[in-house]
Amino acid sequence: MKQLVRLRMRPSRNRKSFRYMLDYVDHDGRRRQISLGHADKRQAERQRQEKELELRVNILGPVSMRLTDFFRDSLARTKGQVRATTLSETARAMKDFVECVGDIDVQEIRYKHGEQFIQYCLDQEVSAATVTKKVKHVKRVFQLAEDRGQLDRHPLRRLKPPKAPRRKIRVFTDDECHRLCIAAQQYEEKGSSVKWELLIRMCLGTGMRSGELMNTTWRDIDFARMTIDVSPKKDGEDNWEWHIKDTERRMLPLTADLVKMLIEHQISQPEGCPYVFVPITQYERIQELHRVGRWNVEKG
């Protein structure tokens, strides 16, 4: 099969170093030479393969591809359009699907493979609710492939996931809530740097998720109006990027007791940490990782 993308080396002006570049003809028939900006051969070859796959898919329409290549292409196309955690869950579901049906041609996928996948997951003692999520992710990938023209039809369109009973909601009694707060106080007295009692009281009083609380900054709290703004964060000098689950931004009321505890906590907290519940030592470690590019949205 003719190679559509070639990997070439572009020397520097002083001829003492070089960088890799991609050489190919685009969809409009124009010659393209794109510098990759580095001299890492393994990374350059991976980028060449990704561009090769992209060109073949877009030029030929429905094409024969192994499932691993098909899934890799799908992840590359949707990266940045969905949350990093969603992308990771999709990748895991894809991996399980390939392990079940084999690395066959994507054009060979049929409805029976979907049924086989469901039974495979259940045999692995995966809960029906988790199987439903995996099926949802896999079906979405095939739906996008049909929309892009990679497939003539969505082979799993009519596949129904197993029915999962709704879990009973566990409601804590007043006594249980009180004992949780007492236990948190005792834990803090042992030297914990985390304000566990305030965290638990905030959770009980607002219904916020743990990730929402840990990503709360002092800017999110309006002491005068007694509210807290559960809002996404962009990358900044003193904070990291973070997204709310289901983009569920909201303004929540605070009780007088919570406001009092927050004020006391703010007074006692050392300067330089914008986060309410991230201890200063942990914040400094995260910021160091953030500065060198080793901290991502998923970790946040």
Image (tube, rainbow, N blue to C red):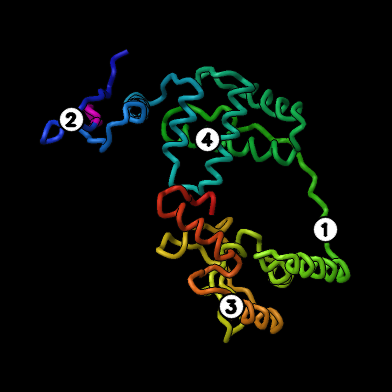
The magenta stretch spans which residues? Answer: 20-29
Res. 141 mark: 4
The rendered magenta stretch, by its main secondary structure, is classed as: strand
Judge the density around disc 1: few (<14), some (14-19), many (≥20) Cα neighbours within 10 Å. Answer: few
Q: Whole-Å distance between the Cαs marked 4 and 2?
A: 37 Å
Horizontal and vertical percent position of residue 274: 51, 70
Query: Is the C-beta separation of discs 2 and 3 under 8 Å?
Result: no
Judge the density around disc 4: few (<14), some (14-19), many (≥20) Cα neighbours within 10 Å. Answer: some
In the displayed structure, 274 sits above or below 281; it is: below
- Kindly report which numbered mark, 4 or 2, lies closer to the viewer in this rendering: 2
* For marks 2 and 3 on the same chain, the one whose residue lies earlier in the sequence: 2
- Outermost residue toward the front in this view: 191
- Kindly report which numbered mark, 1 or 3, lies closer to the viewer in this rendering: 3
Q: Amino acid at mark 3?
A: Gln
* For marks 1 and 2 on the same chain, the one whose residue lies earlier in the sequence: 2
Horizontal and vertical percent position of residue 193: 65, 65
Query: Is the C-beta separation of discs 1 and 3 under 8 Å?
Result: no
Q: Whole-Å distance between the Cαs marked 1 and 2?
A: 63 Å
Which residue, given by chain and number where applicable, does mark 3 sit on? 266
Q: Is residue 106 left or right of residue 33?
A: right
Res. 170 mark: 1
Q: Residue at x 68, y 79 (%)?
A: 261
Q: Secondary structure at mark 2?
A: strand
